[in-house]
């Protein structure tokens, strides 16, 4: 007995008590993905909490006696009375090259069945956008491979260009073409699917893999069946992943498809959190929702590391109404918009860009000299054509000038049509537009202009490849290049 007491005393003498202080609260109410918690006196906005079943939650409401938490996972195991633990950290997501070529959820967890993602870096989901001093003006083109966009509404690296239009007008197609065109440019891409059907996301990933662009792309998915909290987080998570590459002086293209569903998810959460609703039942801070997201897309001055994030947010309109609440909000935040019109789409104009309502506020600063030279007056000519063509429907007798304008505009419209899988280099775009503007298509039937343009391009690729190489490399139209282009067109026989 004496030896037992001695051993016990020795153990007690060598024992060093350790204590761990934890902030804990209690679940008071559960329902519809929202949990009300009390007892966490030092809680902060956007802090991550851990529930008893291991699921995490995000604080979005700080009330006097309670906090509102959105659950980032399964709500099933959370019950009233359970303890909630504060983690003391703000939400972050994994980032790095390991995510390229992968499909992940907004928390960075893999969805593609290719195994775990071994990332050592984490980026905060919410981050203050770079200041004015760090930014640089947008003057480097981001080519989409789509003639109508690169010529009429050019996009520059670091720009935010809205793609807007009714459902089923080709908005996602335009964005995917832009991503696919970056595969050999060094620009990395992030595609954020918000509230999309799983079948659509699978089809999108298959398209990117087939084109070879998936290797340089991250796909972030919060599908239609995902919780509203995950749909809300998706664009911020995608931007955080892009900011890792920005920090490493790289260029990134990010597509948000689409921010209308993002606003719906936020409205759903806000109403459940009992925030007062305003216009169209959206909470008053819905503008801040998208402005703090899109302001993070910019071009950084070389003194601060360089790099850029170019954003292509997508917004869905109802019956072409761009004056609705969310469309006008996002239009006022972005640097221009590409408006896709249902009537043009159904008339066979693809991409169905409405020239009058589409604009790039960066303008020709984001165009190469070669494109600027051939597309300088193209937008005005097409706008005049659309106006005169509408008028000509009711006029029986037209003067020669009006007839020439309509004929020329119709041929420009035809040459700008492009298939969803057809991407063109700068030289190919410049050559086709130049050929029509110089009048070489004036004797071609309007219905044959597109076929003529494709055949002419094939002739140039096989017979005069040095002309394309010259435009693509030098990005200017020298007198020698123009002379070679004339020679190429004049030697072409259209059958």
Image (spheres, grey):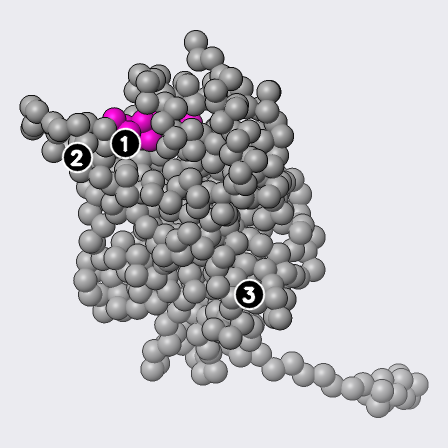
**Callout 1: helix, strand or loop?**
helix
Is residue 202 in view? no
**Front tag of 3 and 1:** 1
Residue nearest the observer in this picture, 51 or 431: 431
- Is 259 one of the magenta-colored residues? no
Separation of marks 3 and 1 at Cα, in angstroms: 39 Å
Q: Quadrant of residue 365?
A: bottom left
Q: Which mark is residue 409?
A: 1
Side (left or right) of 143 relative to 271: right
Q: Position of residue 157 (x, y in %)?
A: 51, 54
Depth order, front residue of 430/250:
430
Mark 3 highlights which residue? 300
Mark 3 lies on a secondary structure that is: loop
Please state the extent of the stretch shown in magenta in the rendering.
Answer: 407-419
Tell whether 119 sits left or right of 420: right
What's the distance in space between the residues labelled 1 and 2, CA to CA?
Answer: 10 Å
In the image, what residue occupies the spot 44% across and 37% down?
146
Give above or below for 171 relative to 454. below
Q: Mark 1 near mark 2, Cβ–Cβ under 8 Å?
A: yes
């Amino acid at each position: 007995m004496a030896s037992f007491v001695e051993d016990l005393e020795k153990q007690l003498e060598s024992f060093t008590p350790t204590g761990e202080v934890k902030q804990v609260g209690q679940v008071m109410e559960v329902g519809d993905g929202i949990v009300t918690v009390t007892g966490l006196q030092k809680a902060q906005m956007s802090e991550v909490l851990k529930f008893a079943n291991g699921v995490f939650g995000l604080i979005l409401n700080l009330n006097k006696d309670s906090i509102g938490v959105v659950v980032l996972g399964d709500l099933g195991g959370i019950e009233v009375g359970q303890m909630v633990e504060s983690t003391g950290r703000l939400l972050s997501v994994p980032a790095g090259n390991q995510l390229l070529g992968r499909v992940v959820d907004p928390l960075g967890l893999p969805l593609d069945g290719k195994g775990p993602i071994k990332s050592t870096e984490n980026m905060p989901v919410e981050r203050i956008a770079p200041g004015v001093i760090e930014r640089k003006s947008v003057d480097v083109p981001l080519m989409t491979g789509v003639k109508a966009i690169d010529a009429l509404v050019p996009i520059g690296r670091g720009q935010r260009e809205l793609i807007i239009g009714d459902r089923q007008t080709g908005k996602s197609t335009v964005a995917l073409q832009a991503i696919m065109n970056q595969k050999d440019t060094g620009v990395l891409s992030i595609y954020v699917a918000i509230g999309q059907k799983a079948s659509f996301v699978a089809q999108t990933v298959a398209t990117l893999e087939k084109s070879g662009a998936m290797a340089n792309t991250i796909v972030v998915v919060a599908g239609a069946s995902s919780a509203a909290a995950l749909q809300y987080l998706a664009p911020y998570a995608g931007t955080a992943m892009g900011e890792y590459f920005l920090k490493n002086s790289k260029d990134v293209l990010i597509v948000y498809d689409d921010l209308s569903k993002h606003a719906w998810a936020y409205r759903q959460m806000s109403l459940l959190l009992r925030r007062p609703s305003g216009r169209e039942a959206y909470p008053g801070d819905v503008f801040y929702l998208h402005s703090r997201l899109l302001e993070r897309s910019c071009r950084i001055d070389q003194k601060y590391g360089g790099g850029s994030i170019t954003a292509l947010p997508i917004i869905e309109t109802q019956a072409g109404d761009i004056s609705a609440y969310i469309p006008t909000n996002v239009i006022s935040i972005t640097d221009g918009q590409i408006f896709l019109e249902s009537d043009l789409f159904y008339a066979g104009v693809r991409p169905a860009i409405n020239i009058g309502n589409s604009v790039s506020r960066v303008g020709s600063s984001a165009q190469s000299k070669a494109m600027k030279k051939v597309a300088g007056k193209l937008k005005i000519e097409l706008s005049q054509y659309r106006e005169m063509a509408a008028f000509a429907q009711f006029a029986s007798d037209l003067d020669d000038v009006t007839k020439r304008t309509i004929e020329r505009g119709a041929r420009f419209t035809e040459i700008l049509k492009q298939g969803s899988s057809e991407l063109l280099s700068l030289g190919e775009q410049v050559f086709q537009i130049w050929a029509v503007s110089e009048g070489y298509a004036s004797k071609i039937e309007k219905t044959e202009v597109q076929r003529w343009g494709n055949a002419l391009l094939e002739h140039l690729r096989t017979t005069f490849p040095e002309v394309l190489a010259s435009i693509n490399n030098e990005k200017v139209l020298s007198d020698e290049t123009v002379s070679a282009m004339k020679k190429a067109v004049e030697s072409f026989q259209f059958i």
